[in-house]
Amino acid sequence: MMNSINLYIVVPCYNEEDVLGETSRQMLLLFDEMKADGLINEKSRIVFIDDGSKDKTWSIIDSLSNEHTEIAGIKLAKNAGHQNALLGGLMTVKDDCDCAISIDADLQDDIHVIPDMVNAFIDGCDIVYGVRDNRETDTFFKRSTAEGFYKLMGAMGVKIIFNHADYRLMSRRALEEFSKFPERNLFLRGMVPLVGLKSTSVYYHRNERFAGESKYPLKKMISFAFDGITSFSISPIRLISSLGATVCVISVIMAIYAFVQKLMGHTGAGWASLMMSIWFLGGVQLLSVGLIGEYIGKIYKEVKRRPRYIIEEYKNDKK
Ligand code: UDP
Ligand code: MG
């Protein structure tokens, strides 16, 4: 069994002056407990990343890191957005730790499952997903849209962990493999499962934000969801192709209908030919757009330059 883990907790912060005091207090308490239990070692750190905040966030992080050896800070040059800030933090610490846990600054995710995550890591897991057990604390709207989104992603073939956001443990090795994903449009909760390796989930109860307000207003939430879909799936493009095919079939039916109407003398001059061409051309146009989309979809997959495989084990005893 591995003992005394060098754990890094990575916390992106954007305008979080109201929560940092309490968050660091609770995390330091947890660190003390875990050290007393011999779970983590003296080199473990809590790293706050200031994502270009406009308030006192950085000066608070700065003084916290002066007061406590356990606390470290990273300051981003400008606001990069949650996903980028988180990745920046993880990639900065990956060579200093055995494993890193990412968590939001507002303590909505229960920090008391962190020891469970570390234990799962000790048991050999490279990725431990924090999964919320229910969404009671969410409004009906947030709950139904969020759960609908996870289901939609699943239906489009994206392997995403249901009700898991960005609260997770990654081993140094998983982080190393993850650094090979060079893409620019980040949707971490969809990308991490692509690494594979041994993983598990721990379940927790999600609280309400205890101070400050959400940095994810509805507009950002929608654009994040849209990013998630378009960064992972080309099924919207396929949708155009199938729509085109459907319209083409309808155009045949409409052509027969228009022709019959014309034979029966129910039509004005030019109506039948117009009807036929509108439907037929519409179908052909959609099909063509879909076809071009197929190629764009391929280009899009290529430019991502995601690693094509990740080796979990190389056994070569006779070497
Ligand atoms: N955050 C960030 N950069 C941004 C927006 C948000 O680093 O541009 C951080 C924020 O400080 C918090 C986390 O991302 O630690 C999640 O944000 P929030 O809790 O407001 O989102 P919600 O829980 O409402 O979805
Ligand atoms: Mg939050």
Image (cartoon, rainbow, N blue to C red):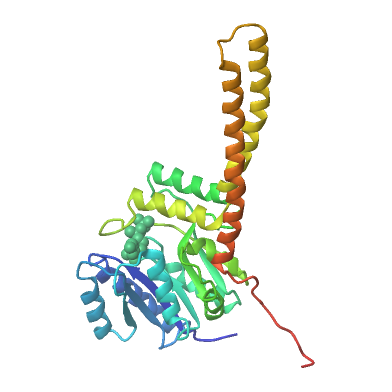
In percent of width and height, residue 89 lies at: 40, 75
Give the quarter of the image for residue 126.
bottom right
Taking the spot 40% from the left edge, 52% from the top edge, the residue there is: 223
In percent of width and height, residue 258 lies at: 63, 17
Taking the spot 60% from the left edge, 72% from the top edge, the residue there is: 307
In percent of width and height, residue 82 lies at: 37, 64
Taking the spot 65% from the left edge, 72% from the top edge, the residue there is: 309
Residue 191 appears in the picture as rendered = yes
Residue 106 appears in the picture as rendered = no
Which sits in the foreground, 282 or 87? 282
Quadrant placement of the C terminus:
bottom right
Quadrant observed for ligand 1 in the rendered image: bottom left
Give the quarter of the image for residue 20.
bottom left
**267 versus 294 height, above or below:** above
Which sits in the foreground, 242 or 286? 286
**259 versus 1 height, above or below:** above
